Image (tube, rainbow, N blue to C red):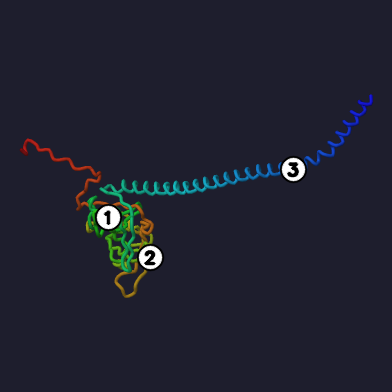
Amino acid sequence: MLLAQQTNQLTRLKDSLSFIVHPVLIVVDLPSQLYAWLTESTTELSELADENQRLKDELLFLKVKLQKFEALETENTRLHSLLESSFKIGEQFISASLIKVNQHPNTTNIVIDKGSRFDLYKGQAALNEDGVLGQITNVHPLTSSIILITDPNHAIPVEINRTGLRTIASGSGLKNTLTLPYLPHNADIKIGDLLTTSGLGGVFPSGYPVATVTKLAPLPGEAFMHAEAKTVAKIDSTRDILLVWSQQQPIPILSGAPEEPEVPTDNAR
């Protein structure tokens, strides 16, 4: 009986002590739990930071790739327009790309990536998808130089598309601007008239768009009026160029394949 009472008292004492010791154990264990929580949180934050950086890098890559796609789409549209122009030309042609612009005080010319290896010749007409650009002045094996129609040293025979009146369009040295120095005051010409190549001189085949008349002003005491025209081709932003063979020049083989040897006939033996 006495032993049972002592056992009950001991049990109650243990229970009482457990209420006292438990908070102490929690406080003692708190630093280790806090450390574990901080370690886990830091790991998660590090993983989130790494993932965030990865997503940022991926987004940057996709943006750059999208820019490339947009550039390719623009280039594809431009080349498609150039190809459509080549079908409209109806003559032998070859395409080339701009590689350099040479600017001097009195002249401006461009350099393209085609030359005598493609049978290009001095004086050959150069166009883009919109209209006439100029003509070749120097030919090298791999490159050629083109003088622009806006160059003050260049002149091109043109005709007014509406009336057929023929005249000369000269380079002004200004951006996309030509002058018409030989138009009499009574010439049938209006602002907005389209000027096309007349075909005279044999350099530029007839019918190519050159410029649109933008300014007409009488010059008192002068035989000719002051007239200006804006080039149809956007000369300052041209990248792709067509070289056209005129009737006076031999048409080359552009495929790059060697010519087949002539097979002798019975009559040739």
Looking at the figure, which quarter contains the N terminus?
top right
Rendered residue at 80%/41% (across/down): 24
In depth, the one of 215 and 33 nearer the eye is: 33
**Closer to the eye: label 3 or 2:** 3
Q: Left or right: 103 with respect to 122?
A: right
Q: Which mark is residue 30?
A: 3
Q: Which mark is residue 215?
A: 2
**Which of pointers 3 and 1 lies earlier in the amino acid sequence?**
3
Question: Where, by quadrant of the figure, is residue 178 drawn?
Answer: bottom left
**Closer to the eye: label 1 or 2:** 1
Q: Left or right: 30 with respect to 213?
A: right
**Which of pointers 1 and 2 lies earlier in the amino acid sequence?**
1
Task: Find the distance from the CA under tag 1 to the CA under tag 2.
Answer: 37 Å
Q: Amino acid at mark 3?
A: Leu
Q: Amino acid at mark 1?
A: Thr
> x, y (%) of residue 156?
28, 61
**Closer to the eye: label 3 or 1:** 3
Question: Where, by quadrant of the figure, is residue 161 drawn?
Answer: bottom left
Mark 2 surroundings within 10 Å by alpha-carbon count, few (fewer than 14), some (14 through 19), many (20 or more): some
Residue 17 at least partly seen: yes
> x, y (%) of residue 252?
21, 48
